Amino acid sequence: MDSIIQQHPDWKPPYLATIFTTQLGKDLEGYEEASDLMAELVEKYDGFMGMHSARDEEGYGITVCYWKSEDSIKAWREDLEHQVAQSKGKGGWYSKYTIQIAEVKRSTFFEEP
């Protein structure tokens, strides 16, 4: 499973998490490039804290993004480039997906010295 881990030990709850689970579809033309662009673009958003992302060999993936507020999530959802990617996701990149928003009330962090 490939993964991206961007987390900071100083994140203090409560904060929000968007949980995006996906199953890749059959038409993946442009998907990798768009995925990389979205990862770069989201980092520039005020209120974005970081993300975890992983995908298995069968194309099932999960990306969790961490946010300071619902307004930050809304701004990202309404970003024009993100909306283009959302449309392509529904147009063939994904055979199915879910989006959930949760509040993180407690978090622990460990990193091997």
Image: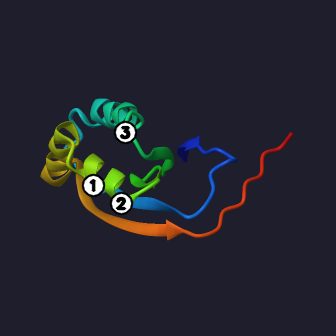
Classify mark 1: helix, strand or loop: helix
At label 1, which amino acid type do we have?
Answer: Lys
User: Dot 2 surroundings within 10 Å: few (below 14), some, or many (20 or more)?
Assistant: some
Number of disc labels: 3
Residue on which the image places disc 2:
70
Separation of residues labelled 2 and 3 (CA atoms): 13 Å
Which residue sits at x=39%, y=36%? Answer: 39
Residue on which the image places disc 3:
45
Q: Quadrant of residue 5?
A: top right
At label 3, which amino acid type do we have?
Answer: Tyr
Is the residue 104 above or below the residue 112 in the image? Answer: below
Q: Quadrant of the C terminus?
A: top right
Separation of residues labelled 1 and 2 (CA atoms): 6 Å
Q: Quadrant of residue 108?
A: bottom right
User: Dot 1 surroundings within 10 Å: few (below 14), some, or many (20 or more)?
Assistant: few
Name the spot of residue 12 as percent of width and height, x first. 63, 56
